[in-house]
């Protein structure tokens, strides 16, 4: 993890990248990519959410000694934004990279996190797909030139890591080479750990779950060590347990995002303490 005041996306001057077999428009401008999502005001995507919780508490009236009840509505989205505002100063625009199996939970979390922090959102796989001319073309390119495809993944991460104030949903290629892992160190990386069984239920490939699930378990086993190199792991199962939920479906996007922000806060505080300890007396 490296917390730095990075270049903002609005002032970023990108360079041309042309891995063999892919056509990137020179200059390859992330800001004009169709995958670019300037999350700034209202949310424009489906989100798992919970209605505001109503809590009551009794407070003694100092003048009459009578007990009055105050009802307060707790909006989970407000709690997330409040936490995000509290850590923004220490974060200093440091970008955040989310690794883990691709699924709707990770995507929604990334977008919601970007909104809360007033960051920009990118999906690194989508950028590679666009450069290849679409997802089908990217798949064909990968099958014909695996090395070239990996170079494209690295170039995209290189550009993203040079920018500040980003939330990036990173593809599996981000944790499959030492070069890419080094690029993730330009920001804070988090493994969003979602069980393969849960990912299978969100799969839209059209294949039966009985066929998809073994593939996902194999992928999880293959990628787990790479995911674990992230600065922090945020587990869906652990969050559910902490909240007292028996059903993973009860965990909301707000719940996951709040846990991510808490972990980021711990990291920034730890770094600050280390910097203060290193200062000469």
Image (cartoon, grey):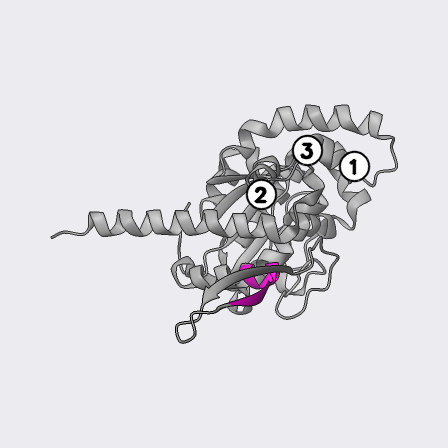
- Residue at image point 87% right, 30% down: 208
The nearer-to-camera label among 1 and 2 is 2
Q: Which residue is mark 2?
A: 243
Q: Which residues are magenta?
A: 68-79
Taking 1 as reference, is 228 left or right? right
Q: Which residue is mark 3?
A: 146
Residue 211 sits in which quadrant?
top right
Q: Secondary structure at mark 1?
A: helix
Pick the quarter of the image with the N terminus: top left
Q: CA distance from mark 3 to mark 2?
A: 43 Å
Q: Position of residue 24 (x, y in %)?
A: 68, 54
Examine the structure image and report whether residue 188 is included in the region drawn in magenta.
Answer: no
Residue farthest bottom in this picture: 63
Q: Which residue is mark 1?
A: 201
The nearer-to-camera label among 3 and 2 is 2
* 12 relative to 142, above or below: below
């Amino acid at each position: 993890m490296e917390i730095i005041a990075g270049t903002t996306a609005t002032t970023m001057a990108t360079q041309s990248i042309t891995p063999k077999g892919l056509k990137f428009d020179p200059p390859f401008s992330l800001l004009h990519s169709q995958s670019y999502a300037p999350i700034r005001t209202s949310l424009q995507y489906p989100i798992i959410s919970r209605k505001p919780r109503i809590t009551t508490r009794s407070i003694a009236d100092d003048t009459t000694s009578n007990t009055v009840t105050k009802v307060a509505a707790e909006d989970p989205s407000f709690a997330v934004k409040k936490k995000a505002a509290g850590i923004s100063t220490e974060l200093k625009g440091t970008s955040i990279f989310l690794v883990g199996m691709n699924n709707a939970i990770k995507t929604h979390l990334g977008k919601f996190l970007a909104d809360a922090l007033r960051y920009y959102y990118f999906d690194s796989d989508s950028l590679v797909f666009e450069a290849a001319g679409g997802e089908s073309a990217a798949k064909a390119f990968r099958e014909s030139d695996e090395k070239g495809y990996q170079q494209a993944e690295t170039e995209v991460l290189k550009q993203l890591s040079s920018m500040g104030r980003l939330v990036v949903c990173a593809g599996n290629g981000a944790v499959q080479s030492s070069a890419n892992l080094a690029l993730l160190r330009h920001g804070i990386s988090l493994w969003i750990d979602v069980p393969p069984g849960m990912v299978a239920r969100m799969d839209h490939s059209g294949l039966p779950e009985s066929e998809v699930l073994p593939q996902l378990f194999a992928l999880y086993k293959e990628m787990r060590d790479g995911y674990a190199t992230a600065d922090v792991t945020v587990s869906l199962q652990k969050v559910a347990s902490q909240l007292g939920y028996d059903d993973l479906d009860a965990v909301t996007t707000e719940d996951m995002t709040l846990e991510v922000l808490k972990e980021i806060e711990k990291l920034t505080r730890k770094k600050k303490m280390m910097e203060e300890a290193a200062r000469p007396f």
